[in-house]
Amino acid sequence: MRSIVLAGLLALSTPAGAEVVSSGPNGFVVRETASIVAPVPQAYAAFARIGSWWSGEHSYSGEAANMRLELRAGGCFCEQWKGGGVEHLRVAVVQPNERIVMTGALGPLLYEGASGAMDVQFERIAGGAKVTMTYRAGGFANGNGNTMAPLVDSVLGEQMKRFRTFAAKGGGKK
C-alpha cells in the first residue's frame, strides 16, 4: 500500500526544470527547479543527505555514499575515500528550511581556475516545496564557459531529479 501511495505522490510531483540562464567565455549561470510533494523541512533535510541521492557517476570515488554535506557555516560538501578526498563546495550561508549557499568549483571546473556560488532556496508551495538551485561560475582560464554551461546544467539537472525523487519518498524524515 505504501508503495502505491508513494508512486502516486511521485506522479504528482512536477518534473525538475533546468536551464542555462546565461553564459559567456568566462562564466555562466544555470538554474534547476523542482516541486516536491513533501513539506519544506523534509525537503531541506533530504538535501543534506546528499550521499543518498547524488549520482556516484558524478563523483571522484564512484560512490555517492562517500559524500557528506555539513549544514553549518564553514561546513563542507566533501567526498572522502580511502587514500583521498575532495572538497566540492564550502558552505557559506545556512538559513534552515530557507536557503543554503555554497562556494567553490564543482567537478572539472576545479581544474579550470573557476569558482562558483551555488544558491539553493526552499519555498513553501501548495502541496509541498519548491526547491531552486542556481549555480553561478566564473573565471575560466581557457575562456570555455559557453562550452561548460550546458554540461554543468545537464549534470545538475540530473542531480535535481534524483533529489526530487529521494525527498518525495521521505528521504528527509528522521
Image: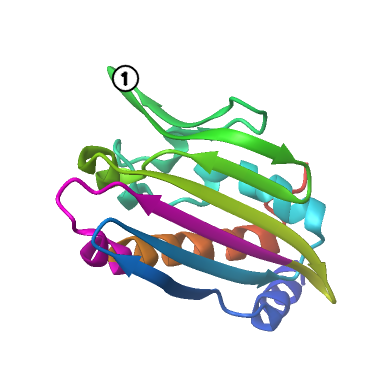
Relative placement, left or right, of 26 versus 172 is left
Q: Is residue 154 above or below residue 17?
A: above
Asked whether 54 or 105 is in front, the reply is 105
Quadrant position of residue 96: top right
Residue furthest to the right: 126
Q: Is residue 145 magenta?
A: yes
The amino acid type of the residue labelled 1 equals Lys
Report the span colored magenta. Answer: 130-150
Instruction: Point out residue 8 in the picture as x, y percentages from the top left corner.
Output: 71, 80
Residue 80 x, y percent position in the rendering: 39, 25
Occupied quadrant, residue 25 = bottom left
The residue nearer to you, when weighing 166 against 121, is 121
Colouring used for the render: rainbow
Q: Could you tell whether 128 is left or right of 136 in the image?
A: right
In the displayed structure, 92 sits above or below 18; it is above
- Residue 171: give x, y in percent of width and height: 67, 52
Residue placed at 29% from the left, 65% from the top?
24
| Quarter in which the C terminus is drawn | top right
Side of 73 where 61 appears, left or right = left
Q: Secondary structure at mark 1?
A: loop
Q: Residues within 10 Å of mark 1 (few under 14, many from 20)?
A: few
Q: Which residue is mark 1?
A: 82
- For the N terminus, the quadrant is bottom right
Quick one: which residue is furthest to the top in this view?
A: 83
Determine the residue positioned at 77% across, 48% down. Answer: 173
For image coordinates 45% across by 75% down, the residue present is 19
Q: Where residue 39 sits in the image (x, y, percent)? A: 82, 61
- In the rendered image, residue 135 lying in the magenta stretch gets the answer yes
Q: Could you tell me which residue is drawn at 75 percent across and 70 percent down?
A: 37
